[in-house]
Image: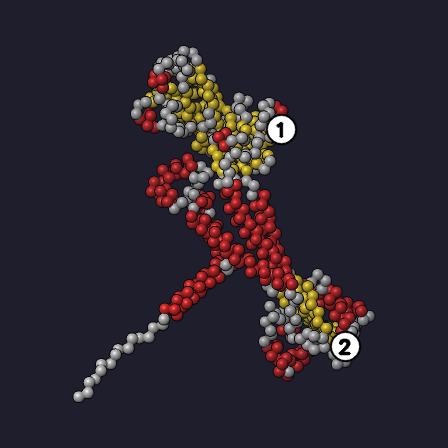
Amino acid sequence: MPEHTPATAQKPATAPRSAQQPRRTGAVTSFLRNAWRTLTAMRTALILLFLLAIAAVPGALLPQRSLNEGRTLEYIEDHGTLGEIYDRLQLFDVFSSWWFTAIYVLLFISLVGCLTPRTIELVKQLRTPPPLAPRNLSRLPHHAAYRTTATPGAAADEVQRRLKGWKVRRSDGDGRVAGAVELSSERGYLREVGNIVFHFGLLALLVMFAAGKFVYAEGMRVIIANDESPAFCNTTPSAYDAFRAGLLVDGTDLSQFCIKVEDFTADYLPNGQAEMFTSNVRYSEEVTTTDPDTWEPYRLQVNHPLRIDGTRVYLQGHGYAPRFTVTFPNGETRTDTQQWQPNELETFLSSGIMRFDPPAGMYPDLAERREQQIAVQGLFAPTAHFDGTILSSRYPAMQDPAVAIDVYQGDAGLDTGRPQSIFSLDSDLIESGALEKRARVNLKPGESTTLPDGTEVRFDGADEFVNLQISDDPTQLWVGVASVAMMAGLVLSLMIPRRRIWARVTSDDDGVTRVDLGGLARTDRSGWGREFDELRDALVASAVSASGGGAAAPVLPGDAAKDDNSAKGDPARRADVDAPRKDDTR
């Protein structure tokens, strides 16, 4: 028997790898193209702008570490787990967080990708004449017609004269209707210009905001408003109580000036509401000048900063600085005035501390001297109110000042080498017994208390202090320019409609010239019909005047119907009436 060779199983046909690779590459390219189109769409830009506004809300509601780290840490401590979650989500560093930066960068890319083709398209539109008139002007939302005894050329000249300020295209016999003189006019290009200017202003605002993070410098300085306080000179970051700057600023090129605070006045209404804050200062742009009496005076108020060579000095805040004098057992004294932190902004009840080191030589042994340091911690009320021994304040102005203090003796932490708070004592020193409470007392100006070893602590009153914010941001001017451009562009885009008017001048069988008008607004805009009617009335009045009166009249409804019927009888015209070209009415 003949042998049967087993049939070989056929493998399914597969595309060669060289064919699969382009397909895979094409899918990736298509995905990237669609992603780019979506990102650069104006709708996406608006969504990102809305998201950016929402993302900025926590920066206004929660304390920000860059502005007040102490308050931020206090918020986290007071809110426990919730505060820690907020911190992990970077809600205390909103404007430097990765998610805010991501939205910011995507919005920037979206605006650039969206504005580039729109700008190119606008340039093309400005260089392109208006489109030819539609064949059937009566199909437009606004249309009219009238007859005149003027020649077609003269009638067309009159229409063109009335369209002064419009971009006009004239066709003498080579338009949509043979033998007719046609005028195409368009106006309102500033609408799209304003739209683009608005978005370019927004883009510039984003750029300046980002650039400002690299070149800005800002510092805070608390100055006691009395004659004893030294002048502040803007020469080095170390002169500030708090200083922060951009990545490109090292603090060696600050604007050189000095400022001396002479006084501070706070005006309040009878109910305690603040009315105005004013500080009289003197300043000099020459840091080598040492006599403040020769400096320029300036009245510094809220929202009225002092501007010096591009640097702005703001009156940011104020408060009270109690003054204490400590008399040690050997008769030597120490006097200090220190700002205390306002706890209640309605009444300016404030809290704080002071530390006093014994005079040099009084205790030769350093350990013994450290044990004799004096610390004062308590409350200050500008207008005191006592409920028994409990101190509170009933008015923010300083009318009847008083303090409620605890006086400590021991190691106050002056020479520990660790940073110390200026508003609270180190609780570890108190709990360990290194700092012991010696007295608790309420004092008014001039009153004092004496410790067991003979040390006397006297309350001498209080001065007011001001918190000055010194800011230098070279991008601020350009931020203002961008903001003005945005507002101007927005006004243009909202107030100016884009509209077109066409006119067709023909001669009837009886030799009378007929003028057909049609108008179309590219956007719905109230008032556009009134503008068209005014043009029509002016043309009719001009035609009547030119013919001596009575020889020009609007086309009767029957005439318009006749035109429609004639269009229906002509297949070519009927097609044009039923389906006008896209270019005609865009």
The amino acid type, in three-letter code, at marker 2 is: Val
Q: Amino acid at mark 1?
A: Glu
Lower sequence index among marks 1 and 2:
1
Is the residue under label 2 in contact with that under label 1 (CB below 8 Å)?
no
Give the residue furthest to the top: 330
Instruction: Please say if 184 is above or below 490.
Output: below
Q: Estimate the x, y position of residue 422 in percent, counting from the top left.
A: 42, 28
Q: Nearer the viewer, residue 248 or 559?
A: 248
Q: Is residue 517 rendered to the left or right of residue 39?
A: right
The image shows residue 444 at horizontal and vertical percentages of: 45, 20
Residue at left offset 66%, top offset 71%:
133
In percent of width and height, residue 563 lies at 67, 79
Residue under label 1: 296
Instruction: State the image quarter where residue 471 is shown.
Output: top right
Mark 1 lies on a secondary structure that is strand
Q: Secondary structure at mark 2?
A: loop
Is residue 132 visible to the viewer in this orientation of the structure?
yes
201 w.r.t. 176: above or below: above
Q: Quadrant of the C terminus?
A: bottom right
Residue 552 in view in this figure = no
> Which of the pair 232/551 is nearer the observer?
232
Residue 295 placement (x, y as % from top left): 61, 26
Residue that badge 2 annotates: 512
Mark 2: give few (<14), some (14-19) or many (20+) Cα within 10 Å: some
> Residue at left 46%, top 47%?
56
Residue in the image at 59% along x and 71% along y: 582
